[in-house]
């Protein structure tokens, strides 16, 4: 009845990451109304600085009321439909992006393409660079939405670059070459390497060495580098953030081919906590890419009233400086609270300095070193501790036992409850009575489905990697 695209399941939405959210929706925790409900720790959402944005809105009613100097701009905005975007907004956006990068990189607003969030920006850039059946290399573990965003509708194959816990999941030249070789063995034409810096789910920024390896590799293979820098504004600790563009500038590559093969994706969803506003963008020094992406952006524009509101907000430099600083402070404090809470339960996290989550090592809690055991632990934590956390398999992690736990989408009090629950859970699971779990039927059958549908197929649709 449906098209093959509509009915294919290469979008990856049958992973535990998405299913966990469905289970949570049926019994959401509320401090007063439902204190035994499930706590949502699977959503990379930032609620820590929304009060700052709200306070700005209260002080600037003109921006919300679509007014300028006391006059309405409603008609102008209602009729505005130029897919190049509001010039004032793009000017503010490039300034803001520079500020996040310590003003070490200057961006030209003419090289910016607006999109309805990074979701749309990522798909658009892939549509611009690769044909169906061609391949993009993607370091693991990677954001669970990438199967949908990069692969599903574009028909492009994802070839994983396997990173390992033995070196903190860093991207090595060996791992890049290995992925490239596997793609060649499958007769896949590699068009680019796609990175997320800072990483989701790791919460780490890339080192200068990693960025240099990537640039050298891309130059050698004549391929693109796409850097999703959506978490660039969430870096709360040293070492600081280095954009791929800055790394290329440091090597004076501005007048070489690689300069026009580097593309950045970014959005206002994370540090400002505005995923509902759907504001994303592609930045590229490649005129052809900018032109093609602008045409494609017709399918996912940012509404003119959102552009108007945010251009006013970003133009308030005092506000953006304060917001950035305060946000970093709050994120750092929150992450510390999560890490020390987990430590009290004997659980360690990967050392990180960015993001809205920690990458948590629970390998010692698995009954065996398998993805079956990981799914079982996920199910127990969901049903017994009533915490929705995301297992590493949904991020295509190759090693069972890693989980992503989010800390910025809830109140401090809720995080305290979560830490108590995990402590109880660990104590009971190591005691002789163990966990006597009564999972709702829907969660148990879900786990079985996940194992057969998802965990075993860690890679591309052509099934080259049947890893466990
Ligand atoms: C790495 C990464 N890219 C893109 C997105 C999508 O973001 P947006 O809300 O801007 O579409 C997310 C959302 O979590 C993400 O983690």
Image (tube, rainbow, N blue to C red):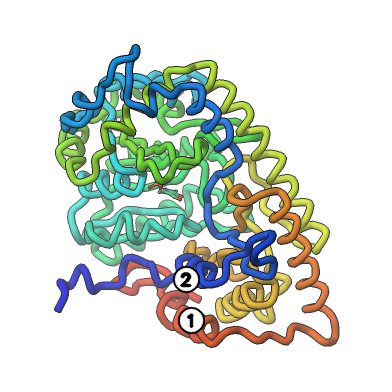
Q: What is the x, y in percent for residue 433?
A: 82, 87
Q: What is the x, y in percent for residue 126?
A: 26, 48
Give the residue pinned by disc 1. 446
Residue occupying the point 62% across, 57% down: 405
Give the residue pinned by disc 2. 19
Disc 2 is placed on an element classified as: helix
Cβ–Cβ below 8 Å for labels 2 and 1?
Answer: yes
| Dot 2 or dot 1, earlier in sequence | 2
Q: How crowded is mark 2: few (under 14 residues within 10 Å), some or many (20 or more)?
A: some
The outermost residue toward the top is 69
Tag shown at residue 339: none
Residue behind label 2 places its C-beta within 8 angstroms of ligand 1: no
Q: Is residue 13 left or right of residue 84?
A: right
In the depicted view, which residue is nearer to us: 350 or 445? 445
Q: In this view, does 454 lie to the left or right of 424?
A: left
Residue occupying the point 72% across, 73% down: 365
The outermost residue toward the right is 432
Q: What is the x, y in percent for residue 42?
A: 55, 60
> Residue 144, can we see it?
yes
What is the spatial separation of the Cα atoms under label 2 and label 1, in whole angstroms? Answer: 8 Å
Residue behind label 1 places its C-beta within 8 angstroms of ligand 1: no
| Number of numbered callouts drawn | 2
In the depicted view, which residue is nearer to us: 51 or 40? 51
Residue 239's place in the image compared with 340, above or below, is above
Residue occupying the point 48% across, 81% down: 446
Residue 202's place in the image compared with 249, above or below, is below
Residue 292's place in the image compared with 12, above or below, is above
Q: How crowded is mark 1: few (under 14 residues within 10 Å), some or many (20 or more)?
A: some
Q: Is residue 40 left or right of residue 73?
A: right
Residue occupying the point 36% across, 36% down: 264
Disc 1 is placed on an element classified as: helix
Residue 97 found in image quarter: top left
């Amino acid at each position: 009845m449906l098209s093959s695209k509509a009915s294919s399941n290469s979008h990856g939405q049958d992973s535990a990451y998405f299913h966990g959210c469905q289970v949570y929706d049926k019994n959401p925790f509320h401090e007063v109304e439902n204190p035994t409900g499930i706590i949502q720790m699977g959503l990379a959402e930032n609620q820590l600085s929304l009060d700052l944005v709200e306070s700005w809105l209260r002080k600037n009613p003109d921006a919300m009321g679509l007014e300028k100097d006391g006059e309405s701009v409603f008609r102008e905005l209602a009729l505005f439909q130029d897919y190049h975007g509001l010039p004032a907004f793009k000017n503010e956006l490039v300034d803001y992006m520079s500020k996040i990068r310590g003003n070490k990189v200057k961006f030209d607003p003419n090289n910016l393409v607006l999109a309805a969030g990074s979701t749309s920006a990522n798909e658009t850039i892939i549509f611009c660079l690769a044909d169906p059946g061609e391949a993009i290399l993607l370091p693991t573990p990677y954001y669970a939405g990438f199967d949908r965003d990069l692969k599903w509708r574009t028909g492009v194959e994802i070839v994983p670059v396997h990173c390992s816990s033995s070196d903190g999941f860093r991207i090595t030249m060996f791992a890049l070459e290995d992925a490239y070789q596997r793609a060649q063995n499958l007769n896949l034409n590699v068009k680019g390497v796609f990175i997320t810096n800072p990483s989701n789910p790791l919460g780490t920024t890339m080192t200068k060495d990693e960025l240099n390896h990537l640039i050298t590799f891309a130059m050698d293979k004549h391929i693109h580098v796409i850097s999703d820098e959506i978490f660039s504004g969430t870096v709360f600790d040293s070492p600081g953030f280095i954009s791929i563009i800055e790394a290329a500038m440091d090597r004076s590559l501005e007048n070489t081919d690689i300069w026009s093969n580097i593309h950045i994706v970014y959005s206002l969803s994370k540090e400002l906590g505005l995923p509902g506003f759907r504001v994303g963008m592609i930045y590229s020094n490649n005129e052809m890419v900018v032109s093609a992406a602008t045409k494609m952006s017709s399918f996912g524009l940012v509404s003119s009233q959102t552009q108007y509101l945010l251009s006013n907000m970003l133009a308030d430099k005092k506000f953006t400086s304060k917001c950035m600083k305060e946000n970093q402070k709050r994120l750092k404090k929150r992450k510390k609270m999560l890490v020390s809470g987990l430590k009290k339960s004997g659980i360690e996290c990967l050392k990180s300095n960015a993001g809205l989550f920690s990458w948590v090592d629970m390998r010692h809690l698995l009954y065996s070193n398998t993805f079956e055991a990981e799914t079982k632990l996920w199910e127990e934590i969901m049903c017994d501790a009533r915490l929705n956390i995301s297992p590493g398999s949904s991020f295509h992690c190759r090693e069972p036992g890693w989980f992503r736990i989010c800390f910025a989408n809830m109140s401090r009090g809720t995080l305290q409850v979560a830490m108590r629950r995990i402590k109880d859970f660990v104590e009971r699971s190591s005691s002789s009575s163990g966990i006597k779990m009564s999972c709702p039927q829907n969660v148990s059958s879900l786990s079985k489905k996940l194992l057969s549908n998802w965990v075993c197929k860690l890679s591309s649709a052509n099934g080259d990697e049947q890893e466990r």
